[in-house]
Image (spheres, rainbow, N blue to C red):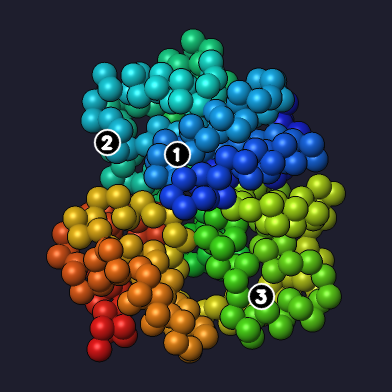
Amino acid sequence: MYFENVKKNFGFGCMRLPMDGEKVDCNEFSQMVDTFLENGFNYFDTAHMYVEGQSEGALKKCLTSRHPRESYILTDKLSTPYFNSQEEIRPFFESQLEECGVDYFDFYLMHAQNAEIYAKYKRCHAYETALTFKAEGKIKHFGISFHDKASVLEQILIEYPQIEVVQIQFNYVDYDDPAVESRKCYEVCRKYHKPIIVMEPVRGGSLANLPDQAKKVFDALNGGSHASYALRFAAGFDGIFMVLSGMSNMEQMNDNISFMKEFKPLSDEEKEAVAKVCGIFQSQNLIPCTACRYCTDGCPKHILIPDLFACLNAKKMFRDWNADYYYSDVHTVHNGKASDCIKCGKCEKACPQHLEIRKLLENVASEFEK
């Protein structure tokens, strides 16, 4: 598996960036970009909606205007909120090139494909349009990012054999989860000989911020950080072309570089520890939200759904007053409460995890709005 100029199997996911208030901290982001490149890594992944629309512009300021074009690999995506006809795709694509400050993308992905979204892309001839961009030299490689059942992925790969790469959610907790089907999606990619890009290897940070019982399992190994086991788990499978990590500060950057620069797969002892941690997570009955925030964009009541789910998960894990404080005094001060949900269902249509968000918000309300 080879793509020109890609140096390592570890990529910088730009969905979560260092922030200064509500704006990207471009000073720290520039330092992170420089450190990433200096250590031999060069793959960057973005989308127009990331960081509330700031990710592409931040990459222009901190990466593409500061480093030669041949020194980095840049992936962007065609996201469903930004077009409703074939005629709208090219202007949006051209605006992405301009926003990122480049003449071409190394990879361009059809974003967050599931059965419903794929049907829209077919109606709008989005795949054919993207392949036209490739023929024009404006993208080098064409692929998809995917959030659905393995059977849907297989259908797409059969109908569009031109797909060169597939990005899937893949981590040790979701590996055999029937809602995500990470293992089955991985097996479909292998069946059709598609290189795999891994997203959410640390599951929105939840595999770096473990329950105490799980922390003890990894700490007993006297090895790396908790996040290191998640990233190395994903990177150790055959056919994995790239593992993305959304890094929000230099500390996370330096930690990831420390074990991905000279990558080593998990040992048998480490694999046993991962299996134990999986069991602990499953016993907690936590909400499997990755905080991608796709659900919040269209919420008419401006409910910070991932933050409220994080409060409920924290209450289950730590059983202290902090979760109640963050619910009442942080996340719902200027935004909707869980009980404000009008059950329109927009969030569930946008959710890559296929969570029953409306029902889960009822659980949140019953816990924090007694």
Q: Residue furthest top?
A: 136
Q: Amino acid at mark 1?
A: Gln
Give whichever of discs 2 and 3 has the lower sequence position. 2
The residue lying at 31 percent from left, 83 percent from top is 368
Label 2 environment density (alpha carbons within 10 Å; few <14, some 14–19, many ≥20): some
Spatial distance from mark 2 to mark 1, Cα to Cα? Answer: 26 Å
In this rendering, which labeled residue sits more in front, label 3 or label 1?
1
Give whichever of discs 2 and 1 has the lower sequence position. 1
Q: Quadrant of residue 271?
A: bottom right
Label 1 environment density (alpha carbons within 10 Å; few <14, some 14–19, many ≥20): many
- Compared to residue 233, the image places residue 369 above or below, namely below
Give the label on residue 184, or none: none
Q: Amino acid at mark 3?
A: Ala
Check disc 2 and report the residue beneath it: 120
Check disc 3 and report the residue beneath it: 275
Q: Is residue 210 left or right of residue 264?
A: left
Label 3 environment density (alpha carbons within 10 Å; few <14, some 14–19, many ≥20): few
Q: Position of residue 343 (x, y in %)?
A: 17, 65
The residue lying at 46 percent from left, 20 percent from top is 98
- Compared to residue 10, the image places residue 140 above or below, namely above
| Mark 3 secondary-structure assignment | helix
Check disc 1 and report the residue beneath it: 54
In this rendering, which labeled residue sits more in front, label 2 or label 1?
1
Question: Can you say which quadrant of the picture contains the C terminus?
Answer: bottom left
Q: Quadrant of residue 45?
A: top right
The residue lying at 31 percent from left, 55 percent from top is 296
Q: Is residue 159 left or right of residue 259?
A: left
| Mark 1 secondary-structure assignment | loop
User: Is residue 129 or residue 325 the one in the foreground?
Assistant: 325
